[in-house]
Image (spheres, grey):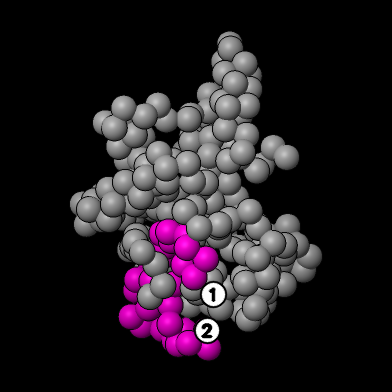
Amino acid sequence: MSDSKLAGQFFDAAIGLLTRVRDEEADSIAAAGAAVADTVESGGRLFAFGAGHSSLAAQDVVYRAGGLALMNLLTVPGVVGVDVMPATLGSALERVDGLASAVLDSSPATAGDLLVIVSLSGRNALPVEMAQNARALGLKVIGLTSVAYAESTRSRHASGGFLRDHCDIVLDSKIAIGDAELTAPGVDVPFAPASTVVTSAIMQAMLAAAVEQLVARGVEPPMLRSGNVDGGHEWNGRVMTEYRDRIFYRH
């Protein structure tokens, strides 16, 4: 069987996007890493949020082997992933005013903490309101979004603003509107989204930059190890005990 031309084209498209992000967002990723390091060093807590498929990149850095133990998932019932039934309900909830405020008010997030909000379009009420309210509470907010949407679509938030308008640091994923990299004869719509590949890479690059910063400051990064290597469970148990007041996925 010959190699798939379309599969190769998708890899090329994803690699191209990753190269663009590496080159064009280097300063912003370094700034985001420094902000994460600042929060860790000062005793703050780390949170990540995303709705729908944007939640995948947020979940990817929580309780992850090789990841920072202090990263917690900020969950909004019904919008984390596609497990809610019907799945379309999650999309509807992203447009509900007031939901983010209610979630933040009942979460452990407080002034001095940091929140990473992942939203491809950044146009729905939920991520915009989440960023607005988090900053009002005194959190540092990093937004991971595609700036193209803010430049070519309309906001669905009452303010008319996008996620990028309410963040301390913006990371641009460079994903084109519609999130589909390929077209082909016989297929009436573009297909093969790359946003998960790119946003997950940006999240990991940001945390790598944070680890680099912490080491440079003489601070030991609180990392998790794989439970599938000898001594991994014992290592993680010690880290979780030491930082138990800043870890919420274990309670």
Q: Residue at x 65, y 65 (%)?
A: 105
Q: Please, what is the three-letter code of the amino acid marked with disc 1?
A: Glu
Placement of 162 over or under 179, stated as above or below: below
Mark 2, residues whose alpha carbon is within 10 Å: few (<14), some, or many (≥20)? many
Q: Residue lying farthest right?
A: 85
Residue 222 falls within the magenta-colored stretch: no
- The residue that mark 1 highlights is 129
Q: Where residue 10 is drawn, which disc sits there?
A: none
Q: Name the residue under label 2.
A: 157
Left-right relation of 28 to 221: left
Between 52 and 8, the one lying in front of the other is 52
Q: What residue type is labelled 2?
A: His
**Magenta-tinted stretch:** 135-164
Residue 201 drawn at (x, y percent): 40, 46
Does label 2 or label 1 sit earlier along the sequence? Answer: 1
Residue furthest out toward the top:
230
Residue beneath the point at 54% across and 75% down: 129
| Among the 4 quarters of the image, the one containing residue 95 | bottom right
SS at mark 1 in the image: helix
Residue 125 image point, x, y percent: 56, 78
